[in-house]
Image: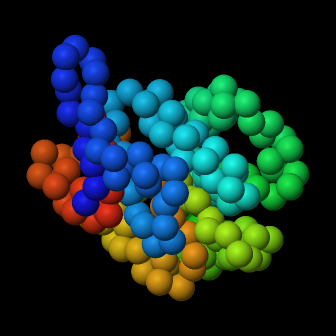
Amino acid sequence: MGGSGGPQSGQEKVVDASWERFLRTPQASEHAVQVYGDADELAASVADYVAAGFARGEPAVLVVTREHRQRFQRALRARGLNLAELSIFGLLTVADARDVLARFMSADRPSAARFEAAVGTMIDEVAARFPDKTVRAFGEMVDVLCRRGLPEAAAVLEGYWTDLAYTRRFSLLCGYRCDSLREDGLQAVTDAHTHALVA
């Protein structure tokens, strides 16, 4: 597990260098998580993560909730990025988290085959346009499941993402809201990732 944020002198936070390194230069199959209280902190991390990738010619796939989409867009524009241009050139793909979930959920459990068809295909389509690059993915689907009271389904989905990384070249950043997790769930979430930042 990588770095974690801890309070120090007021609102200051110390962030482990491995977290900063992940945002700048993640390796294929690295799987990080940010557990956040303030959505603007998550938006800043996502924007730093994908902006650093765009500077290296690496595409991004964002699977985001409707309530956060505009927040992420503002954070990206604040870094001088032209989102329309990035989309036209295929560098930026944005999908709605609940819509993508609906494509592979069977009752209250993710289907492995349908996840492969929905998410694997999305990663494949982006990777095909940039064959020598690592795709940078960000997702909130696990958080949506936790907020629905389905933490076990979220854990299964994390495993599907990890399995997908064995056959695809991408890094992944997940976002969980602090109040989405049960008290006994935080350790399990951080243990499932190679890097973690916890509010």
Above or below, 70 against 31 in this view is above
- Res 142 quadrant in image: bottom left
Tell which of 53 and 113 is nearer to you.
Answer: 53
Residue 83, percent across and down? 78, 40
> Where, quadrant-wise, is the C terminus in this rendering?
top left
**Colouring chosen for the image of the structure:** rainbow
Work out which residue is located at the far top of the displayed protein and give it: 10
Residue 140 visible in this rendered orientation of the protein: no
Residue 138, percent across and down? 53, 54
- In the picture provided, is 84 more to the left or to the right than 38? right
Work out which residue is located at the far left of the displayed protein and give it: 184
Residue 84, percent across and down? 84, 41
Residue 88 visible in this rendered orientation of the protein: yes
Give the total number of marks visible in the rendering: 0
Tell which of 147 and 19 is nearer to you.
Answer: 19
- In the picture provided, is 29 more to the left or to the right than 97? left
Above or below, 138 against 20 in this view is below
Above or below, 134 against 67 in this view is below
Q: Residue at x 49, y 67 (%)?
A: 27
- In the picture provided, is 6 more to the left or to the right than 16? left
- Res 16 quadrant in image: top left
Residue 80, percent across and down? 73, 30
Q: Residue at x 31, y 62 (%)?
A: 193
> Where, quadrant-wise, is the N terminus in this rendering?
bottom left
Q: Residue at x 22, y 62 (%)?
A: 191
